[in-house]
Amino acid sequence: MDLIRRREFVGGAVGTGVLLGAAPGVFAAQKLADIHAQIERGHDAAVVRLQDWIRQITIAAEDRGIEEGCGYMMQLAREAGFQHVERVPTAGHPSVFATLDAGAKRTLGVYFMYDVKQVDPAEWSSPPWEARLVDVPGAGKAIMGRGAVNQKGPQASFLSALHAIRAAGRKPPVNLVLIAESEEEIGSPNFADAVLAPQVRAALEKCVGIFMPEAAQSLDGTVQVSLGAKGVVELELVASGAKWGRGPSQDVHSSNRARLDSPAFHLVQALGTLIDAKGDPAIDGWWDDVRALSAAEERMLDVAATRMSEATAKKSMGVTHWARDADWRQALEDMAARPTVNIEGLVGGYTGEGGKTVLPHRAVAKLDLRLVPDMTRDSAVAKLRSHLANHGYGDIEVNVSGGYDPTTTPADAALIRTLVRVYEGEGIEPIFWPRRGGSWPGFVFTSEPLKLPAGHFGLGHGQRAHAPDEYYLIESSNPKIAGLDGAIRSFVNCLYALA
């Protein structure tokens, strides 16, 4: 990346050398060789550590395995060297808070999630809870299982980095504050309570920033440095004859449709008002708070469009067209800057084999709303309720299960500059990205009262999060991407660079 372009990204106040410093590649090779050697020696143990973690089922949405998962998360933290580890209760599922005092000058906050999405084993080519090693064409040998890449794989690699540091007879170069939640996959409804618990907040206030491990490499080797993430609201819309006052209050024979209203069609008609003909959100006032991209963010996307492969992106998702028949540059902008209203699922009446002639009395739509700056969770929900009422659907229940505001960190934050430096030390020129299309509850860290910078980092590769055949790469056959050992090494290098 040329000097002028980098200045544009980070505000233009200073030159590259002063801003980012020297790449740490030589330092890492000379000063961390003993730790890197321990990574190779601990490879098999690191694989088993991840496999065992995947086998511990932790699904918040089904209230399945979370207490056991909390205990397992605490065990993992202790084994990695955290001296203080405690369970933090919330109104829902618990979080885990841990601290590692290395006697260092700087303290880093680390965010984990130990819950995962639901699965239908029939959709998987390898059982989702067995964490088998499988061959992935174009990538190499990988662990396949639910949570493999989102997020247990990257998190296990980070913990393995701490194991390697200790095996080399060293202390971590920074103190660590870990907060691990168990409700991320249901919208983190109680996570703020855990973060703002007195003992957790006091520890986080000492941190230089919040760090989330990830497997950042695409199959072509490119890496994005995200400067934020969209917010999200997860909710249900419920239409029922009882609440509506029309249609049946219990399922009845479908012949009665001639004389009775349909709650299911009532819901479908309500859903139709939430979007326009192009599929964009049409909720009243929805766009009022949407902040336009800055000139610097526009330039980031200009560069991203030239460096990222449209063909690879389409192939990975099995699509041939972008929404609104957008070109590649516009599709990238939409991903970073466009709020969404999405139907996750529709449930009503009979859904088994064959037909069943009933008129359902109740229908449910599961939705997620993705938010961009300066939208907020509470405002989005209020606008949705008001929209439904104004359009004649005030009887439809809006049941919010979780959600949070968008997250933003400046490109010139010291944490971001350091993460870029580590990538450059690996010979990688990262792509700056205004904000990721997905969500994480970073808002609780970056907003008041903590106001900490937040970033994602990690070499390695994985795909199919939230989908069948999710995997995390262990042994790479692709020279452009790192396997497990390379991912662990990147976390070691990152900790020393942060120090």
Image: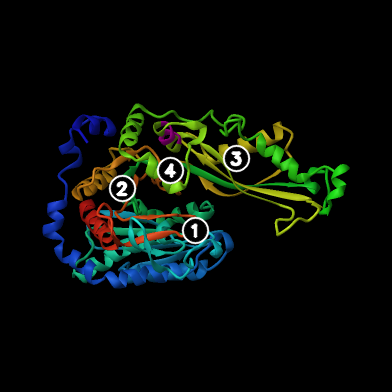
The Cα–Cα distance between marks 4 and 2, rounded to whole angstroms, is 14 Å
Residue depth check, mark 4 versus mark 1: number of the one nearer the observer? 4
The Cα–Cα distance between marks 2 and 3, rounded to whole angstroms, is 39 Å
Find out whether the residues at labels 2 and 3 contact each other: C-beta distance under 8 Å.
no
Query: What residue is shown at x 51% (from left), y 55% (from top)?
Result: 185
Q: Is residue 279 left or right of residue 476?
A: right
Q: Secondary structure at mark 2?
A: loop
The Cα–Cα distance between marks 3 and 4, rounded to whole angstroms, is 32 Å
Query: What residue is shown at x 43% (from left), y 31% (from top)?
Result: 327
Q: Which residue is mark 2?
A: 220
Q: Which residue is mark 3?
A: 381
Q: Which residue is mark 1?
A: 468
Amino acid type shown at disc 3: Val
Compared with 44, 94 (above or below) is: above
Compared with 210, 483 (above or below) is: below
Find out whether the residues at labels 3 and 1 contact each other: C-beta distance under 8 Å.
no
The Cα–Cα distance between marks 4 and 1, rounded to whole angstroms, is 18 Å
Amino acid type shown at disc 4: Lys
The Cα–Cα distance between marks 2 and 1, rounded to whole angstroms, is 22 Å
Residue 37 place in picture, x, y as percent: 18, 67
Mark 2: give few (<14), some (14-19) or many (20+) Cα within 10 Å.
some
Query: What residue is shown at x 25% (from left), y 45% (from top)?
Result: 420
Q: Earlier in the sequence, mark 3 or mark 1?
A: 3
Residue depth check, mark 3 versus mark 4: number of the one nearer the observer? 4
Q: Is residue 159 left or right of residue 2?
A: right
Amino acid type shown at disc 2: Asp
Q: Earlier in the sequence, mark 2 or mark 1?
A: 2
Q: Which mark is residue 314?
A: 4
Mark 4: give few (<14), some (14-19) or many (20+) Cα within 10 Å.
few
